[in-house]
Image (cartoon, rainbow, N blue to C red):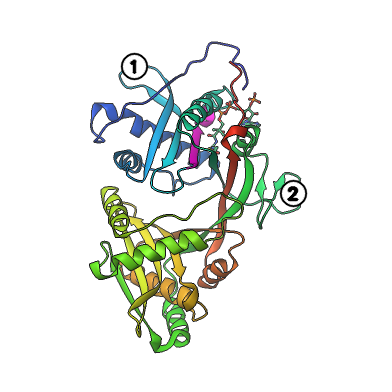
Amino acid sequence: MSTPATTPTWRLLEPPRADRLDAPDAWAYHGIAAVEREVALADLGHDDFPPRAVDILVGDLHPERARRYRWVAVEGDDGAPRVVGHGVLLLPVTDNRHLAVVRIAVLPSHRRQGIGSAIADRLRRVALTEGRTTVFAEVEFAAEPPADAPDALAPAEGAGHVSADLPGMRFARRAGLRLEIVSRRSVLDTPLPDGVVDGFVAEAAAHAGDAYRVHTWQDPAPQEWVAQLAGLEQKLSEDEPNGGLALEVERWDGERIREEEAKRAERGKSGLVAVAEHVATGTLAGMTLLVFAHDRPELTDQDSTVVLPEHRGHRLGMLLKAVNLREHARLRPGTRRISTWNNETNAPMLAINTALGFRPAGGSAELQATLADVVPLSRT
Ligand SMILES: CC(C)(COP(=O)(O)OP(=O)(O)OC[C@H]1O[C@@H](n2cnc3c(N)ncnc32)[C@H](O)[C@@H]1OP(=O)(O)O)[C@@H](O)C(=O)NCCC(=O)NCCS
C-alpha cells in the first residue's frame, strides 16, 4: 500500500443494512452502485453490467444461498457519507462452502491511497473467521490484449489473455491470487436482419428432427418443468469448463429455481427460457435462459445454456438459443445488445455464439488463491 503522505480523507466502516431503497439507512446501496457505475464507465467505457442499488439490496435481503459481508470507504458527513470504495465478500451457504468470493472497487479518483488494501485485509479476516479456504476474484477488462503484447498474461490451463498491467490484476496478483481462466464477453447487436433468426431455427430444427419439441416461457416456469429445470442447472455447474477453479457442483432443486425467479422479479427483471423436451420420454434435454431488466429495454444477458450429454450432437444448443432469440425479439423489439460470457476454452458454446453473430467485447479474468496464501496488503 502506498502510505498516504497526508492524513487520509476516507475512513472504513461496515455499512448499515436496509430493507428498502428509500430508507434513510439505504445510503450505502446507492453509494456502492454509484461507485460500480463510475468504475465501469472509466475501466470498460460503458455501464451495461454494474449492479444497480436494487440488485445489491436484493442480494443482501436473500442470504439463503449466499451471505454477504460488506465494507465501504467513505468521506464526509456521518448521516449520509459519500462512498468512494467498497468491498463485498460473498460466502455460498448450500454448496461451495469452502469459497470466499471477493469484489473490491475504488473510484478512479481515490486509487493508490491504500483503500483497496484496507478493504481486502478486512475481508480476508472475515473469510478466515468463517473457515473458508479458497478465494475467488474477477477482474473485468474492455479488450483482450494480443497474445504477443508484452503485458499479455495467459491462464495456466486454457486460452485467452489478459493484460497483467490492469490495476485489478496488479492488485489481485500482489495479494497472491493466480489467473485461472479468461472469460470472453460476446455481444450480439440487435435487431438482426429479417429472416436471420428464422434461418437458424429452421436449420437447427431440421437436424434435431421430430424427436424434440421446444417450449418457451417468461418467468415463472410451468410447475411441470421446475424439477427438471433444476436438474439442468445442476448439470451445467458440473459440465461447464472451469479450468483450475476449485468449484463444487451446485445443488439445485425446484425451490432454488423459484428463489431465483423471485429474486429476478424483486430486481425488476425477468427470465425468458427455452427448453427442449425429448418427446418419447418427456424429459428435458436442454435449456437456455435470457435475463433482462424491464427498465433497461436496450440490454439483455444471455445466461445459462446446457444440453444433457446423451442429447448432444443434434444442434439442440443452436435450436434453443435461436428459438429464444426469436421469442425475445418479439417481446423486446427495442433491445440493442445481448451479452454473454464463456470460458475461452468452451469451443462448442463459442462456436454457436459466433455462428449467431456474437462478437468479442472484452471479458473477465478469474483469479483464485488458497486463503492461507493470501498476503495482507496494508502496511499499517
Ligand atoms: C483494484 C482496485 C480495487 C485497487 O484499489 P486501490 O485503492 O487503488 O488499491 P491500493 O491503493 O490499496 O493498492 C494496493 C497495491 O495494488 C497494486 N496496484 C493497484 N493499482 C495499481 C496500478 N494502477 N498500477 C500498479 N499497481 C497497482 C500496487 O501494488 C498497490 O500498492 P502501491 O500503491 O504501494 O504500489 C482498483 O484499482 C479498482 O477498483 N479497480 C477496478 C475493479 C477491480 O478490478 N477490482 C479487483 C478485483 S476484486
Residue drawn at (66%, 45%) of the image: 163
Q: Assess mark 1: CB under 8 A from ligand 1? A: no
| Secondary structure state at the residue bearing disc 2 | loop
Q: Assign the N terminus to one quadrant of the image.
A: top right
Q: Main secondary structure of the magenta part?
A: strand
Residue drawn at (57%, 54%) of the image: 183
Give the magenta part as a residue range. 98-109
Residue drawn at (56%, 26%) of the image: 117
- Look at the image and tell me whether residue 240 can be seen: yes
Q: How many marks?
A: 2
User: What residue sits right under mark 2 in the picture?
Assistant: 149
Q: Nearer the viewer, residue 258 or 370?
A: 370
Query: Would you call the spot at circle 2 few (<14 residues within 10 Å), some (14-19), or many (20 or more)?
Result: few
Q: Amino acid at mark 2?
A: Ala
- Look at the image and tell me whether residue 333 can be seen: no
In terms of image quarters, where does ligand 1 lie?
Answer: top right
User: Is residue 135 positioned above or below 118 on the image?
Assistant: below
- Confirm whether the magenta stretch covers residue 49: no
Q: Which mark is residue 78?
A: 1
Could you say where residue 131 lies in the image, as x and y percent from the top left?
A: 48, 34
Give the distance between the C-alpha atoms of the residues marked 1 and 2, in whole angstroms: 46 Å
Could you say where residue 86 lies in the image, as x and y percent from the top left?
A: 45, 30
Could you say where residue 341 lies in the image, as x and y percent from the top left?
A: 51, 57
Q: Assign the C terminus to one quadrant of the image.
A: top right
